[in-house]
Structure formats: structure tokens, C-alpha cells
Amino acid sequence: TPPPSCLGKLIEVLGSAVCVMLLLILTASVAYALPNQTQPTLRLLHAHAKPWLNLAREVHGQYMGGNAQGEYSGTRPLEEPEPRLPLQVSDGSSINRTAESVQAHGEWRLDGQRGAWVPKEGTEQGGGLAIIPNRESERLIDLEVLAKEGANWRMDNRIRVNSRGDHKEALLTPYKDKEQAHASNLVVLPSGEILCVWLSGLLEGQYGNSIVISRLYKSAPQWTRAELVITDPLKVSQSPVLYFDETTEQLYLLYTSYEDQVVSPIGLRKKAKVVTRAGPTEVRSLSTRYAPGQPFLWSESRSVPYFGANAQIRNQLLRGVNGDEWLLPLHYNPLGTPRPGALTDPGNSWADAQISSLARTFDDTSLWSVNNMSSPGMRLIEPTVVRLRNGKMLGFFRDSQAGFIYRAESENEGRSWDAPVRTALPNNNMGIQAVELASGNLLMVFNNNAGEKSPVDSKMWPMSVALSTDRGVMWQVVRDLEESFDTNMDYIYPSIVQSKDKWIHVSYTWSYGQFSRICIRYASFTEEWLMRHKWKTGYTKGLYLGAQNFEYNESFDHKASKFDGIQDRS
């Protein structure tokens, strides 16, 4: 046999290389397709301007079941994850060193309380620095700074309680890795179980995103892993609202849905799209029969018959005083679908045409009638409605001009409303929600800030609660829900409820702007904590300090200035 030519040898080598490459691609594809539960890893929440990192953990047996009374009965232990991401050590020289090699090096240990690799006792290396996986910068995070800022930054669904036992908090794990979480909504069930729904997807406003739900059983140590409720690959689904009908024991989920017209890629996430609305926004509904401790079996989603296009819901549905009507706060625009930028353009007629209203029906299959709560030109949206014990109804509004929260009254079950008036509470053009407590006091959850964001200040902080003893005329007490926060972050879109044991429950979004909705934060506290608690830095870092510190300026011009009516904190 003649010896092979040089060309033949080259072809033989190239063929072998191609085979090896195909084998590697096949192996990687199979590994990627394995479920996350089989490959637990340390996952990053985020790290941008300041060290507000959250470490998401994939764990076995995280789902906790409930018994027939809806109480926690889980017994499966949580397992520690195995860190597998590249890490940086103190000298910055081994940016690709794995967690296993760092541990073997003998200088670092995994701190289970903080979810990070920290210097071992007796070692000089690190100087208080912790190794935390960071896909963007691989930088070191100072644990002492985190501790001083009071950050509870472990995103694992676990409830953490303060030393006095009157304040709890948790960070809810996103439904899927790398997906955003936003616009949460809470409801308390008769068994004491609490439900939280939120929007999950690569980007808010993207077609094909999902609405998911998590459960907190009575006395459970943590929230359950989120489960899918609804997704539509051809539409945008958002703004979920839960309602439990005690007469039928049916749990309803209402949400808004619309089709997209223009999709364009954005640089931050390759798969995400920016959506421009095309068709009218519709309200859709699905339901399930609730039985304590049992899984949800949701019906098919269907359009709710409504009087017009572009209805937007956000806050809780109420039952009529006689028990025969549903009352749903919403806002709509008779001009139909907005163009891009319509909400922020000061001279745009579409923004001026928005109207807040209270829609009513006898069930979700009947046609709705509507009673307007605001007038065109006021730009008041996303109303939250509370029924008081004296029979009156109060409505509070988000101000799309980023000035103040507004208030209106009704004495006939929401069929007519007084003209909305400005309250002492500031508003940054973000969502709010109010609830009447068992004590008869009124509680508002809101951002204690005003004005439009800037490159150095998001204006989306702090997330605060304000208490009123006079039906929302004045707000005597205000407290921030977090002692420290990043002023570049957004703490937005809250939901608030009170359970029968008189605990108050709040959920809201942690976010770095529209393209980075990080997770849902949950906080629970007593009214006593609200009245007596004071952070080391004070009651609030926001604009409004409480009724005793509020100075009202009668000559305040809403359109000319956003701050003259609030006392200067300096």
C-alpha cells in the first residue's frame, strides 16, 4: 500500500477534530437539558452599583406541603448546594478558580448564614472580604458593609424573624433562573395560608411571559417554590390580581393581556424583546376551587366581558356591601392603545385622557358597568379602594406626574365619587395599595419619594408604610420597610394584606430598572412594630416624616413644582 499523501493526512486529522467537536457539543447539550434540581449551583441575584448581591440557591426538597387545614407539614430537609461558579480570591489573581479549589486551599469556608465564602478563622487573607459569584464583574464584596446596611440578601424563600419576633422577611426565589419577577399581589385565605402571584419572564412587557404563584402555609418556615399558573406565547400577560370568593370557595386570578406589534432586541438580554402594544388590552380571568393543602387545578383563561378597550388593573377586587357584586378598581383610556412614550410625554393628549374607575359586575361572566373616580387631565391611575366600617369607600390614586398620592370618597358604594384631593403622601409615579386594619386604622404602602428618576437617583425608594387614624385625611406614622437600601435600585409595586392573626403582610419588587426586576421581597410585621419600631437611622429616609412634621403649602402648584408642599428634611 502506498504511503498516504500529505493531503490525506490533513483530511484525516480534520475529520477526527470534527468528530470530537460534535461529541462535545452533544455532551454539553444533554447536560444543559438536565433539570436544575439535578445540578444545584450557587446563583447570583445581582451586583451593579452597590453590593446588594442576592445569592439564589437551588436546593432539593424546597417545596413544603400543607395539611388539610392549610398548615405547614413539610418535613424534608433543605440540602446545602455545591458551589460551582468561577470565583475570585482576595488577591484577584485566580478569577477562574472554582469553589472546590478555593475550599481545598484551606483559606476559605462556606458561611451558611450569609451564603458566601468567607475567610476561615485564624487566617489573615481576605480582611473581611467574602467570595461571592458575580457573573458580570467577579468582584469582591465586603460582608461588613452588607451587615452594616442590614441587608437580608439571601434569595431562598426562607422566613427570617427579628429578635423581638414582631418582624419577618424573605426573598422569594424566581420561578426560573435568569427570569425577572415583578408586580406581585397577595391574598389571605380562610385557613391562614397566604398566596403571592407575580409576573415572571425575561422582560416586563414581553410576549410569552408567565404568571406564577407561591404559597406560605400557616406556621411554615418558608414559601413554596413558585408554580406556573398561566402563560401565553403570543401575548403579554401582566398585572395579576388574586381574589377569593368565600361564598363559592373559588380562587380567582385576574390579569391584563395584550398582543404585541413591534419587537426589537435589546442589548441587555439576547432573548428579551421590547414590545409596542398593538391591540386593545383586555382583562382575563381563570379560577380554581380552593381546598386547604391541596394543589390548584386552574380553569382555562377567558376574556372578562368589559365595556371598552385598554383597561389596566393593579389592586384588590372588593365584594359589594350586600355580597352580590364584584367591585374592581382600574384605569382605562377612551382613546385606546397608547403609542410609545405616551405615559411620559407632558403634552400628549393620550396621557391626559386616562381615567380611574370602579367597575362592577355580579360575577366574572357578566358585563361590567363602570363609575368614574377621576376626570380626564388629572392623570390619576391605578386606584386602590378601601371600604370603611362606616360604609364609606375611599379611593387612593397613583399620580403619573410624580407628585402626590390623591384621595377620593364615596358614600354610595362607589357609584359616585368626590373630586380627588391631594394627600400629604408623596408619589413617584409608582404603584400604591391601601388596607383597613383590624384596629380600624388605615395603612398605605408606597414609595416615600417624589419626582422623576435621574442617572444617579432612581427615586424608587424607600418602600414605606404610613398609618392613618382619621380615614386617610392625615397620616400620623410612617416607617420604612428596610433600614438601608441602594438609591440606584427600585423598590416598587407593593401589595398589602392583613391576616386574621393581625399580622400585616407586604410584598414588592426589588429591581435595577425596567430591564432587571430581580426578585419579590416579602415583609410581615405587627401594628405594634409599626407604632414603636425605629431603625438606627430613624423612622424613614423618605420625604414625608409623619403628620407632626408635615407642613402644607396652600399655594402649592402641582404642575409647577413637586416638592414645595413637603417639609425639607435638611
Image (spheres, helix red, strand yellow):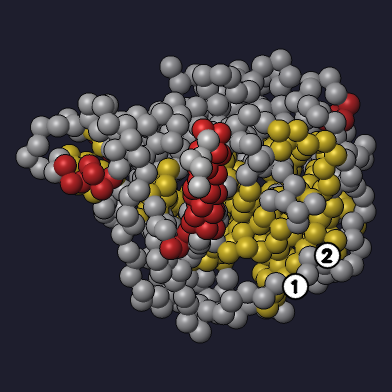
- Residue under label 2, please give it: 302
Q: Amino acid at mark 1?
A: Ser
Mark seen at residue 222:
none
Q: Nearer the viewer, residue 563 or 183?
A: 183
Q: Position of residue 7 (x, y in %)?
A: 56, 34
What residue is shown with label 1?
Answer: 299
The reply to whether dot 2 and dot 1 touch (C-beta < 8 Å) is yes
The three-letter amino acid code for the residue at tag 2 is Arg
Q: Is residue 19 visible?
A: yes
Instruction: From the top left corner, tell me how far across and down residue 73 is, in percent.
Output: 41, 78
Residue drawn at (62%, 51%) of the image? 200
Q: Indicate the secondary structure of the residue bearing disc 1.
A: loop
Can residue 246 be seen by looking at this rendering? Answer: no
Above or below 566: residue 429: below
**What residue is rendered at 85% in x and 39% in y?**
261
The percent position of residue 314, horizontal first and vertical second, equals: 70, 49
Give neighbour class at mark 2: few <14, some 14-19, many 20+ (Cα, 10 Å): some
Neighbour class for label 1 at 10 Å: few (<14), some, many (≥20)? Answer: some
